[in-house]
Image (cartoon, rainbow, N blue to C red):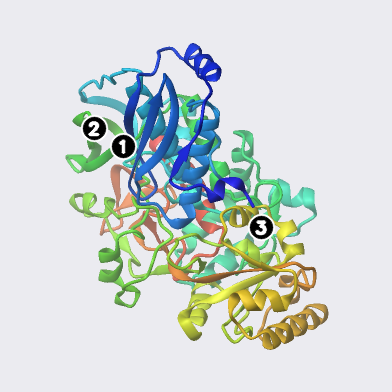
Amino acid sequence: MNKYLNLTKTVVFAVVSAMALAFIGCKPKALADGTYKGTAEGRNGPIVVEITVSEGAVSAAKVLEEQETDFAKAAEDKVLAQFLSNGGKTSGIDAVSGATITSKAVVEALKAAVNEAQGKVEKVAKAKDTSCDIVIIGAGGAGLSAATEAASKGKKVIVLEKMGACGGNTISATGGLNASETSIQKKLGIEDSNDAYFNDTMKGGYNKNNPELVRNMVEKSAATVDWLISIGADLTDVGKMAGSSNKRTHRPQGGAAVGAHLVPVLVKAAESAGAEIRLNSKVTDIIEEKGRAAGVKVSAKNGDYTIKAKAVIIAAGGFGANPDMIVSYNANLKGFGTTNHRGATGDAFEMVKKFNAALTQMDEIQTHPTVVPGNGTMITEAVRGNGAILVNRDGKRFCTEMATRDVMSKAILEQKGQTAFIVFDEDVRKSLKAIEGYVKNGLLKDGATLAELAGKLEIPADAFEATMAEYAKIQASGNDPLGRKGNEMPRPLTEGPWYACEIGPAIHHTMGGIVINTKAEVLDANGNPVPGLYAAGEVTGGIHGGNRLGGNAVADICIYGKIAADSACE
């Protein structure tokens, strides 16, 4: 077992005198004895840490306040342990996979506490009004894609992110990026077509999608994969997600989570191109001048200020973390948990009213079927794509595991306890790197035998063993009475040990939003573009229709983020 997982919130590190002197000698300023606090913004709110300095060296550190999930708490302990074993230095601490925002926030809070111990007083200059060519609201995947593209074309770009870290919901994306007719597919011998991708997306969205927006996304998907690879992304592994007729979900080698990889790549690319990213900077309004978007009003720690701009790109994300707004559009979702980060509150929809901007399909809200209850951790669809099945509390399968997310969510809610178990074997685990994050964070139960696993899940062993034996026969025959296709059953699940995790539906994606055209221009209620105003990503509506296919969000944000930048540059 990982030694860090047994750490309590207070982690004490004894430092001998000689080592303490060495640590003091390598610091720019000596640490004064005492206790010091530091604060940074985590995924769900402020994280406050306290360090203790004894004889000039850090001797203890603990988290005083935080609002993170249970999944992320282990990451806090790991960061504290690295900090202490590193002699009280914050440099070189690795972010914890699957809890990147939380672990980075702990590092920033520790850094602030060390600065206080060194007597450093941070001087914050009062905010001043400024101007730029393009101002972007939001530093998730769409905003960062737009920033990279616009800055690379020589435009002065400022990105405003209300949270304390870049990434938004994108940082938590696991599955990958859907694209068709790509260079990577061709290298791997995967036959796919733009028409197949288009038809899958329309069918998955119950043909409620705007076909022009979908066709535009599909036809630009291959070039976008090449563009992302050119700026440093690894999208060389291609898998299959529910609702897709072919393997087209591009992700890092080995099936690693796409978001935690892609966000740092985009941040580096945007900043290298010259874009300025301002964190903890909340846009409170969009400035309107004679019907045109002319900049934004910002609230930050160093005061309120205005940025005048020739164009405004809204990439602020959806409203999946705003339960009141969710219920106002769909009362059936009252009380549901969410996979969304705390900042996904739909602020932009109020800001665009002055432009008479049109909204569409706001009631189309997707739940993700495989989320750890009370935790918010999403088990990526790629686990099912690589062969996992679902069983209920009777130890039996109850639906095709590769159904679309809405169908899967409904089926799970009809089961006893309104949750189920996702089950897979060692062969599936070896096939997908993303699973290792679930293992490290203690989300899985395992068994050397099926009976042992059944005991840990508290389900009948005989029924479970019979289900698994029957599934192996189904997989071999390629004919599933529940409707799972032969090419969707890559493994018989016969290689022990076996693993399982309890899952259930949670709010995942808001498909509705601001109406845009294929140039990512915001349209008003009459269908006319609002001058100077563009939007991309989950804040927009019409692309996913009544249900979003896994892998289409990352495609959407990168493709339309880049399009928004190109249109704004024109």
Q: Whole-Å distance between the Cαs marked 1 and 3?
A: 36 Å
Tell me the residue at 59%/76% (across/down): 457
- For the C terminus, the quadrant is top left
569 w.r.t. 509: above or below = above
- 288, 258: nearer the viewer: 258
Which residue in the rendered view is the most extreme toward the front? 17
Provide the residue designation for mark 1: 280
Q: Is residue 548 left or right of residue 65?
A: right
In front of the other: label 1 or label 3? 1
Q: Quadrant of residue 513?
A: bottom left
Asked if the residue at tag 2 contacts the one at tag 1, i.e. Cβ–Cβ closer than 8 Å, the answer is yes
444 w.r.t. 410: above or below = above
Q: In the rendering, which numbered label is found on residue 301? A: 2
Residue 36 drawn at (x, y percent): 32, 29
Residue kind at label 2, given as amino acid type: Lys
1 or 2: tag closer to the N-terminus: 1
Tell me the residue at 17%/40% (across/down): 290
Q: In the rendering, which numbered label is found on residue 272? A: none
Residue kind at label 3, given as amino acid type: Arg
Residue 501 drawn at (x, y percent): 58, 68
Residue 113 drawn at (x, y percent): 36, 29
- 384, 542: nearer the viewer: 384
Q: Is residue 249 left or right of residue 321?
A: right
Q: Is residue 398 left or right of residue 486?
A: left
Provide the residue designation for mark 3: 248
Do we see residue 131 in this rendering? yes
Numbered disc 2: secondary structure: loop
Numbered disc 3: secondary structure: loop
Q: Quadrant of residue 456?
A: bottom right
Q: Whole-Å distance between the Cαs marked 3 and 2?
A: 43 Å
Residue kind at label 1, given as amino acid type: Asn
1 or 3: tag closer to the N-terminus: 3
